[in-house]
Image: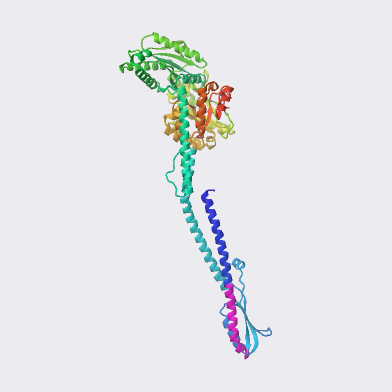
Amino acid sequence: MTLSKQLMMIILILFLFVFLGTFFISIDNTRNFIQNQLASHAQDTATSLGLSLSPHMANNDMPTMERMVDAIFDRGYYKQLSVETINGEDLISRNNTLQIEGIPSWFIDMVPLETPRGEALIMSGWNQAGNIYVYSHPGYAYEELWQNVVATFWWFAGSACAALLMGLIALRFVLKPLRAVEKQAEAICNREYALQENIPWTRELRQMVEAMNKMARKVKQHFTEQTALTEKLRNQAFKDSLTGLGNRRYFDSQLQQRVDSPEEFGHGALFLIKIHDFAGINERHGYKVADTLLQETTSILNQSCKKYSSHFICRLNGAEFAIVISDVSNNEAEHLAENICQSMLQLESDELADENNPIHIGIAFHQHGQEISTLLSSADMALHAAQKQSKNAWVRQDHTALTDKDIRGANEWQDFLTRVINEKNIVLHYQPVTVATKTNRSQHYPHEVLLRIPSNDGLLSAGVFMPMAERSGMVIDIDKLIIGQIIEYLTNQDKSTQSYSINLSAASISDSTFTEWLYAQMRSHPDCANRLVFELSEHGVLQNLETMQNFCNNLDKLGSAISIDHFGRGFSSFGYLRKLKVRYVKIDGGFVRDVDKNDDHQFFIHALTDTLHSIDIEVIAEAVETDDELNTLKLLHVDGIQGYLISKPKPLE
């Protein structure tokens, strides 16, 4: 019950108590007054009539006495009037039947009125000749009493209504700051830290509002400081301060994670890029020109790789860079290398390079199951070969390259995926997520749904075909197909309470037609909506934060939750999480792998977990494969874990 209702109920009870007390006292006083009036009325009549009848009693003039009694009795104010001799014989007796009209019988029973007898002597000379007895009729008294009660009741009823109305208005005005405080508290829970500008004049309310504003500022400051500290730790450990790219430590962890994750990196290419004679440039032109050269090279690499959604770029050492891209063919890799080489020639005209030989590139291809040491060795051999060739050259290591048989052409991929979508020829797997630490948070987490496509070579994982699906604009249809299959599964087969998470692409979320379709599906299947969590990659979230915010809010209203996948992979600020209704984040496996042996990863995960817990976001660690990793993650207060240590992906029956 709300505070306003409680206060109004208390006021009404008090008012009712006062009303009933006043009401009954008023009735009792009125009744006593009326009874006294009845007694006085009867006695006065008896006395007056006794004096009037005395002469006639002496003459024994009965007709005159009867006429005088009738004249008094016929006025209707009396219930009984009788004249008796001194011996008690009835001489004259008149009775009026007790009929009280217009007065409820329950009122007469509840408020009985006594009608006292008035009496007087009738004299005959100096002798007592008889007695006269008079009883007043209570009808008029009851009528007067009833009218008084009704008037009193309506007066109090009107006063109660007026008091209630004024009380509601007053409470609405007085409690308005409390409603503002309630909204402010809800906003803080939703990671919004708005302050109340209107401070109430009531001292207690003013102190409460000021305390809430102080708390909001403190919580915001705490989150900002924690976020800044976490980002600082991550940047110091994994980011190159000059170029803003990942450093060698970041490269090693991310490459290892992708090589070991066929769901993300079924096959792809590694580019090793080295600036020619960087030490000489530094000596001849100074460190400022050398730093500018590194920054311009970074800009060229970022621009050249912009169209590839699944890639990362790192600076390995002073003049060496690396690019890792998923699912590229020979021709695409060669075209990218040639584009980078040509773009770097512009640096000579900008006087950042001494000759038209700015860089060399070595390319090696990765296939599932290949050792990372073999991949790095192949790329390094290709780089050395490029350095021995002509100026500004690139070399692809042929014996590790994927053949045309290994990678379909764009048209072939498009035809293949079109058939898959039309025939709904997909196979769904899932990987469980379990609770890592027993807290007051969730006691179970959604299983992650993984997509497979049957082919002549067996089941293809998403890391093989999704990059091509994104490039060919078919990823939205695939997302719809997965969601439709899961809804059908939850509706017709799975009667448990287990929830499932589905990965959505950034292209789908940015498409208004898809989001409206998804909202309609969730409205049509509310039971399924409560069991679905939609996972979004951090990269996809940051592409259009405003669209993502609306998407999260709409799904939250429909009962579905949102999770951020591969969290921490990029170097963006974590502050955007305050604006999104996110239930979980999944820490990228690059920070989880060998976390028990890596202090930098431990510091980062611990700081990240504390930061996210402060805004009520739960943390799940991906790619957990050893007991040592699990035990370390528990000490770092991670909520849930996912990985081969718990279970390998299983078919969704």
**As rendered, which of 135 and 66 lies closer to the eye?**
135
- Give the residues drawn in magenta, as a range: 34-60
Q: Is residue 368 magenta?
A: no
**Prevailing SS of the magenta stretch:** helix
Whether residue 142 is situated above or below residue 475 in the rendered picture: below
Please state the horizontal and vertical placement of residue 107, each as a whole percent of the image: 59, 66
| Res. 424 in view | no
35 in magenta: yes
Residue toward you, 463 or 202: 202
Q: What is the quadrant of residue 99 in the picture? A: bottom right
Q: Position of residue 594 (x, y in %)?
A: 54, 21
Front residue (pair 339, 567): 567
Q: Residue at x 46, y 43 (%)?
A: 210
Q: Is residue 23 above or below residue 568?
A: below
Q: Is residue 606 above or below residue 220?
A: above
Q: Residue furthest top?
A: 388
Q: Residue at x 52, y 51 (%)?
A: 5
Can you say which quadrant of the picture contains the C terminus? top right
What is the residue that sits farthest to the right in this orientation? 87
Residue positioned 53% across, 28% down in the render: 620
- Examine the rendering and report whether any part of residue 439 can be seen: yes
Q: Position of residue 347 (x, y in %)?
A: 33, 17
In the rendering, at what x and y percent does residue 3 appear? 52, 49
Relative depth, front residue between 294 and 644: 294
